[in-house]
Amino acid sequence: MTDDVVAELGRYQSRAWPLLFRLAGLVDVEAHADGSWVVGESGRRYLDLGSFSVFLFGHRHPKVVDAVRRQLELLPVSSRALPTRGGAAAGRALASLFPFEVKVQFLNSGAEAVEAAIRLARAGTTGPARPLAAVADGYHGRTSAASALSGLDGPHVEHVVRLPREDRDQAVDLIERTGPAAVFVEAVQGEGGARPLSDDYLVAIRAACDTTGALLVCDEIQCGLGRCGTTWAYETSGIRPDVVLVGKALGGGVVPVTALVATGAAFAPLDRDPFLCTSTFAGNPLAAAAVTATVALLDEEAVADRCRATGRALEQVLARLHADFGAAVTGHDGRGLLRSLTFARPDLAGEFLHAVLARGVLVTPCLRAPRTVRVTPSAFLTADELATAEQALRAAAAVARSVIDNESVRS
């Protein structure tokens, strides 16, 4: 059955899928999921500690599923010729998560939200386009401008100033010398290895944006909505961004949806022209229902508190792995439930990924940090589930270390 699915992916979609899945040691096909568990067609259960941070609320949280199901029976996709009550409610709900006045534009993907922020920064400007700035090792998506911000290979059209993440003073100097239209930061980088920026760094960047008139865009698509122990990861610094980008978990793990949230001044171009950044399915009724239910859960289930508490326990697990398998596991990092393990070499990280999948646990590699593996469980991960995860992680780390031990023996 698995071979049939993989063969069809290669025939009708990318030819690379069969190779990638087989390299990953694929032995199953994802069939259904619930809570922190994914179930394959084989009947085997996999503990989900990955999935690119989408399932902060677990798979199929009943309150989100119920809200979407009710909406599905009424109006799944709107005409867009008339407003919807659900769309208005979703905007109000998301805006309520900020202690200052904001406005909201719903979109479909993280990259779309990034592109919308770029449009806001450029709207109404004349003369040569000002550059954009982004912190090194950040990730902001795969569309053209978003890829340029992310520093990925390709024919990108944007001029991007790359800010060093370890040198605050140099970053500030670059902003002041180049005068970017917007500066993009992740308070805790996701694809960059679950690495937090220091609060001092964020404060200095905010001041440099004030000096130059640049918009400060906090990309909270992966690190926001409580995952890092506060509703927004930038909160620990005390700064106030001009734009916040939200996604991944915003649809409760049930419906894909993202949003651009901005202060009134930053949002002004969209007040003048609401079609400046939009698309056919942006803010559709199913997505709106999911957003409203998800925002309600943040308070009802004390999600940020859960992420802090479980995050401390997870940090201890990763610290033990670092201490016990130091030849292979060279570090751990992160905040809340956006965590990572770093290995001595990329191939060891690959061995670990294969071995932990074979033991029924799902984790996620890092696009910008090939030696690093992300661990991003649900806020509802139980103590027993974490204990199960630790056993699998330890066994996989032992496999990675055995590679080094075998090399030593051969030499």
Image: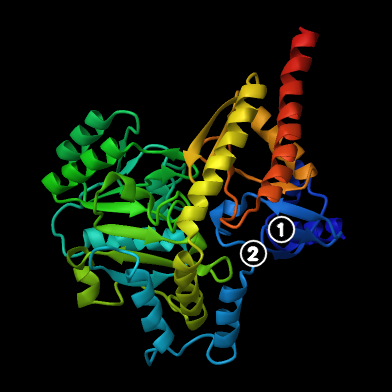
Q: In the drawing, what numbered circle is on residue 343?
A: none
Q: In the drawing, what numbered circle is on residue 59?
A: 2
Q: Position of residue 279 (x, y in %)?
A: 41, 75
Labelled pair 2, 1 in contact (Cβ < 8 Å): yes
Residue found at the far top of this picture: 411
Q: Quadrant of the C terminus?
A: top right
In the foreground, 176 or 168:
168
Q: Position of residue 259 (x, y in %)?
A: 39, 66
First-in-chain label (2 vs 1): 1
- Residue under the point 33% across and 63% down: 116
Q: Position of residue 59 (x, y in %)?
A: 64, 64
Please tell me whether mark 1 sits on a helix, a strand or a loop. Answer: strand
Q: Is residue 277 left or right of residue 144?
A: left
Q: Quadrant of the N terminus?
A: bottom right
At label 1, which amino acid type do we have? Answer: Trp
Please tell me whether mark 2 sits on a helix, a strand or a loop. Answer: loop
- Report the label total: 2
Q: Is residue 271 left or right of residue 288?
A: left
Query: Few, some or many C-alpha atoms within 10 Å of disc 1 (few <14, some 14-19, many ≥20)?
Result: many
Cα gap from disc 2 to disc 1, whole angstroms: 7 Å
Using the rendered view, name the quadrant where residue 340 is placed: top right
Residue 345 in view of the camera? no
Q: Position of residue 134 (x, y in %)?
A: 33, 43
Q: Is residue 401 above or below residue 259?
A: above
- Residue under the point 79% across and 10% down: 409
- Residue under the point 38% across and 92% down: 81
The residue where tag 1 is placed is 37
Query: Few, some or many C-alpha atoms within 10 Å of disc 2 (few <14, some 14-19, many ≥20)?
Result: many
In the foreground, 157 or 278:
278
- Residue under the point 19% across and 50% down: 214
At label 2, which amino acid type do we have? Answer: His
